[in-house]
């Protein structure tokens, strides 16, 4: 699929000398959800800000739909919607006026039917005549999303959409994002919640210290780097791991009487069958077994520590 | 050119003006009325005519200018500073607009507001003093030029201000003294020669003199020079705004 967004050798050094981005390269296909994952201050917001026009790049290029974000900013920005991290709304404006204003800024005529459908999708239609200052925090965030969508962008940037948002609202936000994807919008979101990337992203980019450490399909990433664990709970406590089982490199948790066996999830031979055979030969009786896939969080922590 | 965006910004700003109509309109009208009562009626009755015009009528153009200047600056500076303060300015940066559309929208609205205020004060003055306007066309042209150039100036202040104090500082510390010393309440020729020369460095003198000429056909300074000075001031403001946006100074990092 053709890339709707293409970032090449993008760097940003702020006036104070701080290098926020180092030579970032990134292609994003139309219709996918990419999660940019990284600790605070990693450069996620700077990357988004350059693409959206809030920050000037020091070097490198970013193109949206083939249009350079600096040289052809009008065409490029028409394709982009941005939901900022901080809630920033004119307090006295009504919801519907806020949408009309944004749509006008993008050079488009008022389209009442479209605005109604956007507000309905975000469960805001009954609040259309409310002043934005009268809304709850969650509603304000949805107003920001509605504003970002009202000029029908093809790429939507969500900068920390669920930072400081309660669990219920976060789930609600995820539903909104999935709905948008179903409508064909390409979505790039930044987050430092790994579970968020795990829940909704197609691909995950890990950014740290201004460098894009990797970009990978979420599934591939989890498979490639994911370890599986087999936990075997025993009927009787063990004093030591029998010699016959030494080749499995087992750990033993004495408190729960559990033997722990780690293996590559995508390995050709997992060794589980022979482990069971050897366990039974050694006369060890099992009470229960459990397998566990390492989460994106485990992978992420491993990755960030490794590079640190 | 994104005219829809200009319209969007313009009508948004005008909506705020009408939402706060009491603040926007009543307070300048009230303060001007007080000036007319104090200077025009109470003190003015003891002052002779200036250049063949009664003192009450003489101060009308200056008082209108006083309000128009301060209103242009405060409207335009607040209009662009407030989104900066709220953070909602991100929308302007991410929208397909250039500084031309932004300036047309914000400055256009601020200039419209202060022109409206100027005309309302003109109407109010009718209640207090008798006067006639000799050159209607020139009066309106001067009013428009002043509204536009000082709205541009206010826009610069709004863009450059880092906090509300700075936003208030220029109108308070620079504009009010310039207007008071710019011949709103007296003719420059009434000053000692040295101060007459000093006064020539005050841009507001040219505005008020030109504006008064449009009313009564007499002026401290040649009307052509007044026009040139105000045009130069406007071009300087435009240049600064263009440079500010081009370099991103105080706008973008």
Image (cartoon, coloured by chain):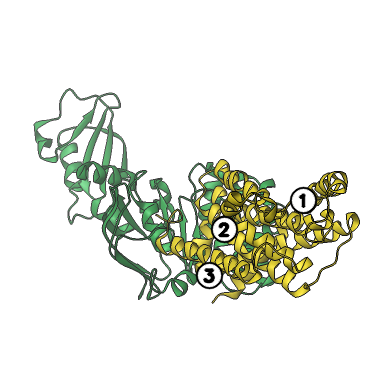
Label 1 residue SS: helix
Residue found at x 65% / y 55%: B75
Q: In which chain is the residue bearing label 2?
A: B
Q: Disc 1 designates what residue?
A: B28
Q: Is residue B160 left or right of residue B66?
A: left
Front of the two marks 2 and 3: 2
Q: Are marks 2 and 1 on the same chain?
A: yes
Q: Looking at this view, is B25 or B94 the one in front?
A: B25
Residue found at x 38% / y 69%: A70
Q: Disc 2 designates what residue?
A: B153
- Colour assigned to chain A in the rendering is green
Quarter of the view holding residue B113 = bottom right
Expressed as whole percent of the image width and height from the top left, the position of residue A55 reads 40, 58
Q: Which mark is residue B100?
A: 3
Q: In which chain is the residue bearing label 3?
A: B
Q: Are marks 2 and 3 on the same chain?
A: yes
Q: In which chain is the residue bearing label 1?
A: B
Q: Are marks 1 and 3 on the same chain?
A: yes
Q: Give the Cα separation between the discs numbered 1 and 3.
A: 30 Å
**CB atoms of marks 2 and 1 within 8 Å:** no
**Res. A100 in view:** no
Label 2 residue SS: helix
Residue found at x 28% / y 42%: A301
Q: Give the Cα separation between the discs numbered 2 and 1.
A: 20 Å
Q: Residues within 10 Å of mark 2 (few under 14, many from 20)?
A: many
- Colour assigned to chain B in the rendering is yellow
């Amino acid at each position: 699929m053709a890339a709707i967004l293409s970032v090449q050798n993008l760097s940003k050094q702020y006036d104070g000398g701080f290098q926020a981005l180092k030579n970032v390269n990134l292609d994003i296909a139309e219709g996918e959800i990419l999660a940019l994952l990284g600790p605070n201050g990693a450069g996620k917001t700077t990357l988004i800000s350059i693409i959206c026009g809030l920050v000037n790049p020091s070097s490198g290029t970013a193109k949206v739909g083939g249009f350079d974000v600096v040289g052809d900013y009008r065409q490029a920005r028409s394709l982009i919607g941005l939901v900022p991290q901080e809630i920033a709304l004119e307090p006295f404006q009504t919801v519907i006026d806020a949408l009309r204003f944004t749509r006008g800024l993008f050079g488009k005529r008022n389209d009442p039917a479209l605005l109604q459908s956007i507000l309905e999708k975000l469960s805001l239609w009954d609040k259309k005549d409310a002043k934005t200052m009268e809304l709850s925090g969650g509603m304000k965030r949805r107003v920001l999303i509605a504003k970002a969508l009202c000029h029908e962008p093809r790429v939507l940037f969500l900068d920390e959409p669920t930072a400081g948002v309660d669990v219920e609202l976060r789930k609600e936000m995820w539903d909104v994002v999935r709905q948008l994807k179903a409508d064909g919008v390409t979505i790039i979101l930044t987050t430092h919640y790994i579970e968020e990337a795990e829940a909704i992203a197609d691909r995950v980019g890990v950014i740290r210290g201004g460098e894009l450490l990797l970009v990978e399909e979420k599934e591939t990433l989890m498979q490639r780097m994911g370890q599986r664990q087999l936990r075997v709970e025993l009927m009787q406590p063990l004093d030591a791991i029998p010699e016959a089982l030494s080749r499995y490199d087992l750990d033993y948790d004495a408190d729960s009487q559990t033997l722990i066996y780690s293996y590559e999830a995508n390995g050709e031979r997992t060794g589980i069958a022979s482990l069971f055979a050897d366990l039974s030969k050694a006369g060890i009786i099992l009470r229960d077994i459990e397998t566990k896939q390492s989460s994106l969080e485990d992978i992420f922590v491993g990755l960030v520590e490794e590079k640190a | 050119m994104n005219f829809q965006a200009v319209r969007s910004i313009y009508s948004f700003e005008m909506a705020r003006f009408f939402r706060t109509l009491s603040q926007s309109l009543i307070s300048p009208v009230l303060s001007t009325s007080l000036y007319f009562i104090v200077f025009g009626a109470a003190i003015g009755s003891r002052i002779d005519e200036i250049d063949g015009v009664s003192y009450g009528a003489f101060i009308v153009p200056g008082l209108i200018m006083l309000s128009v200047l301060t209103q242009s600056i405060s409207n335009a500076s607040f209009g662009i500073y407030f989104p900066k303060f709220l953070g909602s300015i991100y929308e302007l940066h991410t929208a397909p607009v250039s500084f031309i559309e932004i300036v047309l929208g914000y400055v256009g609205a601020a200039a419209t507001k202060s022109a409206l205020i100027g005309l309302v004060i003109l109407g109010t003055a009718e209640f207090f003093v008798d006067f006639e306007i000799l050159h209607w066309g020139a009066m309106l042209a001067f009013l428009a030029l002043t509204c536009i150039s000082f709205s541009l100036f206010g826009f610069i202040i709004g863009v450059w201000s880092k906090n509300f104090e700075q936003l208030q500082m220029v109108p308070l510390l620079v504009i009010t003294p310039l207007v008071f010393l710019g011949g709103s309440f007296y003719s420059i020729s009434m000053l000692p020669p040295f101060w007459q020369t000093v006064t020539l460095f005050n841009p507001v003198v040219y505005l008020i003199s030109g504006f008064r000429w449009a009313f009564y056909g007499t002026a401290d300074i040649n009307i052509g020079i007044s026009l040139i000075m105000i045009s130069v001031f406007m071009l300087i403001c435009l240049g600064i705004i263009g440079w500010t946006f081009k370099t991103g100074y105080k706008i973008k990092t």
